[in-house]
Image (cartoon, coloured by chain):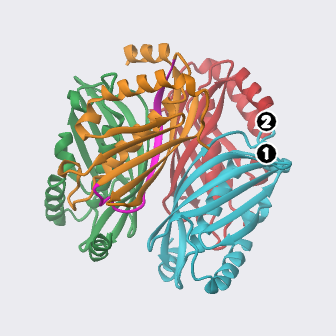
Chain colours: A orange, B green, C cyan, D red
Amino acid sequence: MTVVERDEDFAPIENLIRENVERQGFMKLVGAELGELSRGSCTIAVDRRSELLQQHGFFHGGVTAFLIDNATTVAAATLLTPGKRVLTAEDKLNFLSPAIGERLVCRARVIKPGRTLSIVAGDVFSVSGREEKQTAAALATIAVVDAAALAQSREDA
Amino acid sequence: MTVVERDEDFAPIENLIRENVERQGFMKLVGAELGELSRGSCTIAVDRRSELLQQHGFFHGGVTAFLIDNATTVAAATLLTPGKRVLTAEDKLNFLSPAIGERLVCRARVIKPGRTLSIVAGDVFSVSGREEKQTAAALATIAVVDAAALAQSREDA
Amino acid sequence: MTVVERDEDFAPIENLIRENVERQGFMKLVGAELGELSRGSCTIAVDRRSELLQQHGFFHGGVTAFLIDNATTVAAATLLTPGKRVLTAEDKLNFLSPAIGERLVCRARVIKPGRTLSIVAGDVFSVSGREEKQTAAALATIAVVDAAALAQSREDA
Amino acid sequence: MTVVERDEDFAPIENLIRENVERQGFMKLVGAELGELSRGSCTIAVDRRSELLQQHGFFHGGVTAFLIDNATTVAAATLLTPGKRVLTAEDKLNFLSPAIGERLVCRARVIKPGRTLSIVAGDVFSVSGREEKQTAAALATIAVVDAAALAQSREDA
C-alpha cells in the first residue's frame, strides 16, 4: 500500500531529502547511492567492492543493515508535512540468503503512514547480471517528530 | 546469563574469531575494533570520525546496526563447538537516544546458547569522556550450522 | 514468493496439521479457526466477542499476537519434509491500526523456506462487513528441527 | 535502568491502570493476573491449565505473546503524565525454551522512557515448584499519545 498523493508538492521534499542524504558521511564512506524516490518509497543501492565484504566474500550483514536503516527512514521522510522530521525508532531484519552479487539494492516502502509513527517495509536484493535474489526482509518503525522538538533534543543530548 | 565454561579450550576459538574478523573488509572500512572476547560475550567499538556520521553530526544509525550485527554474531561464535559455524538469522534493534559521543561501544552477550540457534542481546553505548549513555538495545537470533553445510550453501548460492 | 509444489503429497500433511491445531487448548479457548491451508500459506481467523477485547472495545493486542504466532508457525509446517517439526524461534509484529471489526483474519505466507529456518510474513486484517483493513504486519523465524531431537528436548525440558 | 520517581503520585496511576486491565475481556479469558506494579515495571502471570496449552502440553506461544504485549504496555503506562495514554506500537519476542512449568510469569521494565515513545524489555519465566527458567525475551516500543487524540482516532477508526 504505497501512498502516492499531492505530487505537485513533492519536488521540494525530494530536494531536501537528497541534500540531507548527501551530507551523511557514512553514506559516502559506504559508497551507496540514493536512487528512486517517490511518495512513500525509496531505493538505495551499493556496488560490490572488497571494503564492503565479510570474511567469506559476501556483502557484510552490516551493509545490509545500513541500507535498511537508511532506506526505511528516507521512505518515511517522503511523506512528511512541513515542520516535521523523521527519526528511526527501531527496525528488525531477517537475512534470507547470502548477499553474493555484484550489487545490493534496498527498496523501502511505507506500509502505514502516520502522524507520529510510520511503518515501513524494506527488502534487500542481491543483483548478479540480470538476476535479482532477495537477501533480506525488514520492518521498521519511524517516528515523526516536530523539527523544533528534534533541535531541542539535540541540544539536550 | 553469560555462559562461561571450558576456558582451557577458548584460546584457539578466540584466535580463529579474531582472524576471521580481521578479514572483514567492512570492519576495516568502518574502523571498528574487536575488543573483549570471552565465552558468550564480545565487545566491538569505533571512534567518532566524520565518515561515520549522518547529517546532524551523530553516528549514523547504520553504524549502530553494523556494530550490533557483528558483535551479536561474534558473541555466538565464542560458544561454537568444533565443525560448527554461525550465521546471523535476524536481529531487531531499538534506538534509545542519539549517538552523539566520541566513541560507540557495542557489548553483546549470549542470553540463550543452543545447538542450532543462539539468542544474543546487544547494547550500544555512546561514550563522551568518562560518561557512557545507552543509545541502542537489540535482540538477535544466530544460527549454528555445520561448517560443511555452510561451504555447500556458498557453492550453491 | 509463496512456495507451491508437490501437491499430491499435501493431503497427509494438511491432515496432520489440522489434527495438531485441534489439539491446542488455547486455540479452542480463543475460538479461532484454521481456515485455508496450502503449501507455504495459512489463514487463521476469529470472530469478535467480548472475551477477546481490551478496555476500549477493540480486539486485544494479545489476540493479534496469538494469531500471528500460530499462523506463521503453521504456514512453515506446510512445507515440512517427513521426520521434521517446526518450532517458533521468534517473531516481531507492528500494530498498524486499531482492530475494531467483527472479525480478525491473519494470513501468513512463507517468504523463504529453509532446511533449518523458514522466514514467514504475517498480516492481520480487521473485517467489518465487506471492508477489510490491515491492523498488523509481522515477520517470524520458524526453526525446522528433527522430530527425534524435539522429543528429546521435551524430555530434557 | 528502571525509572523510579515521584512515588507520592503513583497511587492514582496504579488504580487507573488496575481498573483498565480489569476491563480487558481477554485478560479474564486467559485468567492472567496483574501482579507487582511500580514506576517503570509490571508483572503479569498466569497459572497452567489445559486451555492455555498447545498440542505438546506446553503453554501456547500465543499465551507468552499475550503476556508480553500486555505487560510491556502496562509498564510504559506506569510512567504516564496526566492527559497521556499508551498504545503498543510493536514488539519482538524470542522464544528461549519450552514453557513447561505450572505458571508463566512475565516481568516488563521500561529501559528508556520517552515523551512520545517508551522502550520496554519483557522477560517470561516458567515456574516449576521453586525453580524459574526463562522461556522468552522481548523488546517493545510503546507510543505515548494524547488522550484526546486517542479518543479521536477511535471515532475515526
Kindly identify which numbered label has been placed on residue C56.
2
Q: Three-letter amino acid code at disc 2?
A: His
Q: Are marks 2 and 1 in contact (CB under 8 Å)?
A: yes
How packed mark 1 is, by other alpha carbons closer than 10 Å (few <14, some 14-19, many 20 or more), is many
User: What are the residue bounds of the magenta stretch?
Assistant: A84-102
Residue D150 coordinates in the image, percent (x, y): 72, 27
Q: Chain of mark 2?
A: C
Q: Quadrant of residue B18?
A: bottom left
Query: Is residue C12 depicted above or below A81 in this figure?
Result: below
Q: Is residue D151 left or right of residue B56?
A: right
Residue C114 coordinates in the image, percent (x, y): 46, 71
Q: Is residue A42 left or right of residue A116?
A: left
Query: Is residue B143 depicted above or below A113 in this figure?
Result: below
Query: Is residue B5 depicted above or below C157 in this figure?
Result: above
The residue where tag 1 is placed is C53
- Secondary structure at numbered mark 1: loop
Point 22% across, 22% down: residue: B129
User: Is residue A33 shown in magenta?
Assistant: no
Q: Quadrant of residue B148?
A: bottom left
Point 23% across, 55% down: residue: A54
